[in-house]
Structures are given as C-alpha cells and as structure tokens.
Image: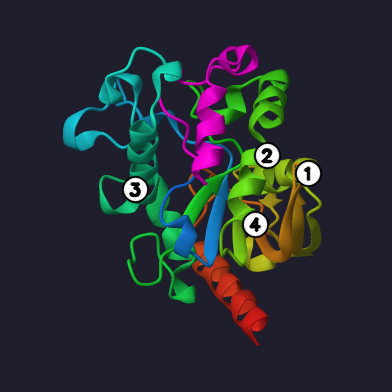
C-alpha cells in the first residue's frame, strides 16, 4: 500500500487537485486505522479539514497533530519526499485511532459497527475508515462545485480500489446517500434498496424523510478489480449531520448492520 500512498503524494501538484481546493500542505489520507487487519470498514466522502487544522484555521501541532504536513516533515515541497517520510505518513494513518482521533466525527460511526465486535479503537478486532477521495479540502464536500468533485474523483479514484484489493476487508458500511450515489458512479456496486420506517426522520413541515437501507456487493472500483466480492451496507442519513437522527434511529441502524454481517457469516 506504500505504492498507493506514494502515487497519491506525487499527485499533490496536480492542477486539477489544487483547483479543487485540497489542503496542499497536508498529506493524503488513504486510510484511517489498521486497514491490513480490518474485516470491516466505513466509507465517507473525503477527510475533514479538521484533521489538519483547528476551528480557527491554524495548523494542528504537537500532541494535537493528527496527520503529517510539509511543516511536520520539515520539507518545502512534496517532491522532496523520501522513503522515511512515507513510512512516517503511513504510521500516522494506521495509528490514527490510538493517538488523537477526531472523535466528534468517528465515535458515532463506531457505535454503528459495535455489534460486530469490531471497533476503530480495538487493537484485537480493529475496524478502519476509508474515503472515496483521500485528500482533505478547505471547504466541505457539499460546498465544492460539481466540477471540483468530479476532478477529485477522477484524479484519485483508483486509490480506493487499490486499498480494498490489498486488504482483508469483507464489509463496507457507507455513511449517507451521497456516499452511496458517488460509489455507484465509480464502481460496479449493485444494491437492493429497502425503505425502513423506523429510520424515518421528522421535519417541521410535518413531512418525514424516509429511511432507506442499501445492501449489495462490489467487485471493482475505478477499474481496479478487487479479486473478490465485498459486501456493501449503506443508509441514506448522514449520521453526523442529518437533522433529527435520534438515538433510536442509530440503534436501529446498528442492529441492522449487525444482522446483515451475521447473515453473511452464516
């Protein structure tokens, strides 16, 4: 997987990526956690800018640092990268949950997979997190233009396929409808769609946002053959940001994920 990381770093000067507002001084993040030992992974859109900076925009330093940057590696540009630097960047990625994880984002996802006995924070039965795009951007994904999103996916899309191909991951949990729809665009993912009343969310106008479950499989991503079929489980609500996601809804989604994985094992 070092080869994938090296390739992602070599793209940091790509004009399309720069125009898509990547954090140019922050390293790519191909994985969060022990991907080479994880049977289950969650999947998001792209890393938050909070992985590199505080709320005021200042770079995280010292014990608050989560990932490497040009400053922390003491280099002026990414073309100065060495094998030792690559090793240090990879250690930050795989050791992420044992250092200073962004728990405001990851804790709620970890609860959803807790019924599987896997956890981001477990050293015995680790889970990991992956993103469709391994570059943090200054603005949230929803605020990027369609062209910026397309460029990010086109330039870096094969990285996800390479990571999955070289991992033992058996199940991927997709966090939100946008993740589901974007994965469909770049892969051969096929889903069964089911409406689940217990997941519906109320709105002030009296209407309900229906709860939707996606279950299927995937064999290739961005032209990369995975060498096996990986189970895909998704839900249409973004657990961290969808308005009105209650504890009861989270518990119901958790129970559904647990049931699906148990069925897979049987």
Instruction: Pick whichever, 39 or 175, lies toward us.
Output: 39
Q: Name the quadrant containing residue 218.
A: bottom right
Which residue lies under the disc numbered 2?
Answer: 158
Residue at 26 percent across and 34 percent down: it is: 65
Separation (CA) of disc 4 from disc 2:
24 Å
Which residue lies under the disc numbered 4?
Answer: 235
Tag in front: 3 or 2: 2
| Residue 48 % position (x, y) | 45, 33
Separation (CA) of disc 1 from disc 2:
7 Å
Separation (CA) of disc 3 from disc 2:
23 Å
Which residue lies under the disc numbered 1?
Answer: 223
Q: Is residue 233 magenta?
A: no
Q: What element carries label 1?
A: loop
Label 4 CA crowd tier, 10 Å (few <14, some 14–19, many 20+): many
Residue at 22 percent across and 35 percent down: it is: 64
Residue at 61 percent across and 60 percent down: it is: 172
Q: Give the range drawn in magenta.
A: 1-30
Which residue lies under the disc numbered 3?
Answer: 96
Does 246 appear above or below 54?
below
| Residue 223 % position (x, y) | 78, 44
Residue 102 visible in the picture: no
Does 201 appear above or below 183?
below
Label 1 CA crowd tier, 10 Å (few <14, some 14–19, many 20+): some
Contact between marks 1 and 2 (CB within 8 A): the answer is: yes
Q: Is residue 28 magenta?
A: yes
Q: Name the quadrant containing residue 68.
A: top left
Q: Quadrant of the C terminus?
A: bottom right
Tag in front: 4 or 2: 2
């Amino acid at each position: 997987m070092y080869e994938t990381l090296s390739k992602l770093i070599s793209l940091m000067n790509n004009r399309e990526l720069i125009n898509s507002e990547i954090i140019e001084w922050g390293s790519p993040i191909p994985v969060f956690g022990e991907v080479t030992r994880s049977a289950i992974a969650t999947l998001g859109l792209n890393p938050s800018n909070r992985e590199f900076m505080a709320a005021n925009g200042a770079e995280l330093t010292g014990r608050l640092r989560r990932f490497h940057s040009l400053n922390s590696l003491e280099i002026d540009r990414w073309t100065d990268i060495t094998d030792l630097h690559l090793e240090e960047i990879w250690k930050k990625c795989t050791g992420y949950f044992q250092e200073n994880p962004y728990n405001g984002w990851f804790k709620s996802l970890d609860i959803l997979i807790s019924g599987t006995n896997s956890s981001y924070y477990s050293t015995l039965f680790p889970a990991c997190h992956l993103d469709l795009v391994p570059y943090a951007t200054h603005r949230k994904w929803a605020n990027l233009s369609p062209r910026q999103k397309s460029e990010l996916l086109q330039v870096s899309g094969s990285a996800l396929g390479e990571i999955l191909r070289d991992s033992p991951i058996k199940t991927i949990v997709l966090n939100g409808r946008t993740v589901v729809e974007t994965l469909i665009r770049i892969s051969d993912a096929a889903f069964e769609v089911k409406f689940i009343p217990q997941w519906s969310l109320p709105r002030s106008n009296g209407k309900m946002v229906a709860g939707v479950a996606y279950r299927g499989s995937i064999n290739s991503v961005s032209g990369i053959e995975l060498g096996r079929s990986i189970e895909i489980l998704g839900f249409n609500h973004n657990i961290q940001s969808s308005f009105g996601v209650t504890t009861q809804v989270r518990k119901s989604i958790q129970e559904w994920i647990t049931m699906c994985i148990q069925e897979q094992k049987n």
